[in-house]
Each structure stands twice: as structure tokens, then as C-alpha cells.
Amino acid sequence: MSKLKQFDKEQISRFLLKVNFKKFNLYPNVTQDELINYLVNDLSEIFKSGKIFTSSFNNEIIALAALKVLYWDTQHYGYTCASIDYIFLNCEVDDNSAHKYLQKLVCEIENYANSKQIKFMSANISACENITSSILQDYNFKYVLTWLDGMFQSKKKLPVIYEDSEVGLVKESELEHFQIMASTSYFKGGRFYLDSNFDDNAVNQMYFKLIMSSYQNEDILLVYRIKGEPVGLFICKKIIKNEYFDNLKVAPLRYLLVDSASRQKNIGYDLFAKTLNYLMDYSDIITTGFEVHNLPSLNLHKKLNFQFNYAHNVYHWWAKENPGVTG
């Protein structure tokens, strides 16, 4: 069990053949070979700037985790933040072996985080991974919430309610308006607000900065206007052509914001529908993710005929003031 010193694509590929990973369930025509190639490439990129941890037997990987430092979050909050993007397990091993190898893996990660003065880590795993979930909680990772991922792939234009409204790309003059709205009116049930270790004012400022950083990154920012007045915003990341999935064009939705005074008037539905109508001309599928307890969002996605393909749990780990070596 160790930090990976050399990235062996063949060894990683053999291991991934025995991993059950459902994040891309329902994506059109994604084969096992394509999925493995995608994961090998993503792990290789993380290896270049982050850390890959493995737990092995007879030179065959049994469990693997990928950790990377979050530089934007680190700069914003003023302490080192990291994320564990993947925790994989060979699904052919028995439960006792799974516990043993995962314990070694997570213990190594915690010791590494303490040695590098990482103050905060998040971990993201399938909601079905009960053994991994149990091990994480044994090593000071606290369950925060469950996310639900969905996808939309219809090419049929959706009906809208307010025909006289306008949805168009954001104007630079509107950015400050949405920055203030984001820092005061965004959904308070997100993982940063639910974790009391985060300062709410810092979280508000994070969402304030998100508007400008998305604009500067040339993401797609669509504004809902009534008589020229901006009352809603939908941010979509850049449309990605996934070369590993037969050049599938994916439009990842990120952030929906509606002025609090304009809620309960179907404006959220209209903004969502017009956003989908816009994006479907440029993409093969449109993806989304939201907190499973956000029932208004869940019902809105259902009304718009999204399919839900993946449920995953988020865990937060915080360094103790005087951490000892565990394990």
C-alpha cells in the first residue's frame, strides 16, 4: 500500500476492469473500453499534479484513490483544501478483504493530509458503496449530503410560459447584479452551508466570485429578462466534446439563480426550459447535478423530463488541531 510513484496504464486498466463505476450510466453508447480509457486518462492527469494512492496484493491493485489540491478553494478560504475525486475497489474481493484494503488506503490518505497540512478534504463516492462509506466515516470523514445526477437528450423544443420574456447571453453590465444575488439568495442547502466548519460569509463570497470567474472562463451564462430587467441566471460550463465517448458533446449545467422576488411565478421553469432549448442545438446531452433534498429542483427536473442516472454521497474531512498518526 503506497502512493503511486509511476503511472502504469496497463496495471491501472486491469484494475479498472474489476471496478463497478456507474457515473456514466445511461450515457448513449458508452462501452466498457471507452469508460476505462476515459478513467485511465483522468487518473493520469490527476497523477501529474496530485496523488494516486493504491492498496495492492501480489502487484495487483485492490483499492485506489485519487487526491488533488483545490487551488482556487485554497486561495479563497486561506487554508489548503483538497478533494478525493475517485475511490475505487476491486468488486471481486470479499467484504473482509474490502474492509482491510480500504482501511489501509484511507488511513494513508489521512496521514498524508496531516503531513502536508491539508486542513480540508472532500470525498465523493457512489451512494451504493456501503463499505467505502463506512470506512470513510471511521476515519473522520463526515457525511454531508447526497447528490443526484441527471441527463437530458431530447431535441424537441420545450414549451415556455412567458413568450414575451427574453433569455440571452449575459451582458457585462449585469454581472454585479448577479454577484449580489448569488451571495444573498442562493440555495442554502448546499454542502458548504450545511458544514458548520465553513464560515457562511466566506461561502457567500465564494458564490459572489463564482459569477465573475465563470464569465472570465467563457462559460455559458444565460440571463432571463422581463422587460429588459435581469431576474434569473443559468450558468453552464463549456460544452465538452468527449473524445473517449465517440466525441459525445456534453453540456454540463452548473448553477441556477432566480431573484427571490420572482420565485413561485414559473420563472425558474421558463429559464430552465429556454436554457435547454438553447443548449440542445449545440450538444448531444445536457447533464445536471443537485442536492437530493432540494425538492423544488428535483420536481423541476422531473417536469422537464430529465433521467436520473447516478446518486453519490459527499463527505467532508477536517484536520484536527493537533493530529496524531492514525492506523
Image (cartoon, rainbow, N blue to C red):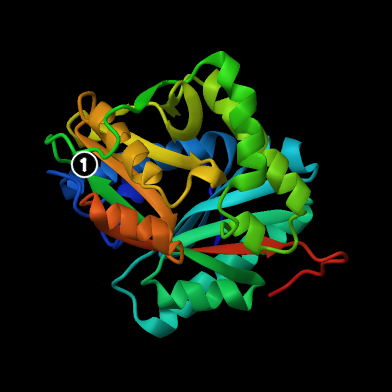
Residue 22 image offset from top left, x and y in percent: 28, 58
Farthest residue to the bottom: give it. 96
Q: Amino acid at mark 1?
A: Glu
**Residue occupying image coordinates x 50% and y 41%:** 257
Quadrant assignment, res 283: top left
Total label count? 1
Residue 9 in sight in this render: no
**Residue occupying image coordinates x 24% and y 38%:** 160
Residue 263 image offset from top left, x and y in percent: 47, 48
Q: Give left or right: position of 123 versus 12.
A: right
**Residue occupying image coordinates x 19% and y 33%:** 284
Q: Is the N terminus in the top left, top right, bottom left or bottom right quadrant?
A: bottom right
Quadrant assignment, res 222: top left
Q: Give left or right: position of 286 versus 133.
A: left
Q: Residue 258 or 241: which is nearer the viewer?
A: 258
Q: In the rendered view, would you say 302 is above or below 230? A: below
Residue 137 in sight in this render: yes
Q: In the rendered view, would you say 320 is above or below 288? A: below
Q: Residue 209 or 44: which is nearer the viewer?
A: 209
Q: Give left or right: position of 288 versus 51.
A: left
> SS class of the residue under badge 1?
helix
Q: In the rendered view, would you say 154 is above or below 323? A: above
Mark 1 = which residue?
Answer: 34
Quadrant assignment, res 183: top right
**Residue occupying image coordinates x 21% and y 41%:** 34
Q: Residues within 10 Å of mark 1 (few under 14, many from 20)?
A: some
Residue 305 image offset from top left, x and y in percent: 20, 52
Farthest residue to the top: give it. 172
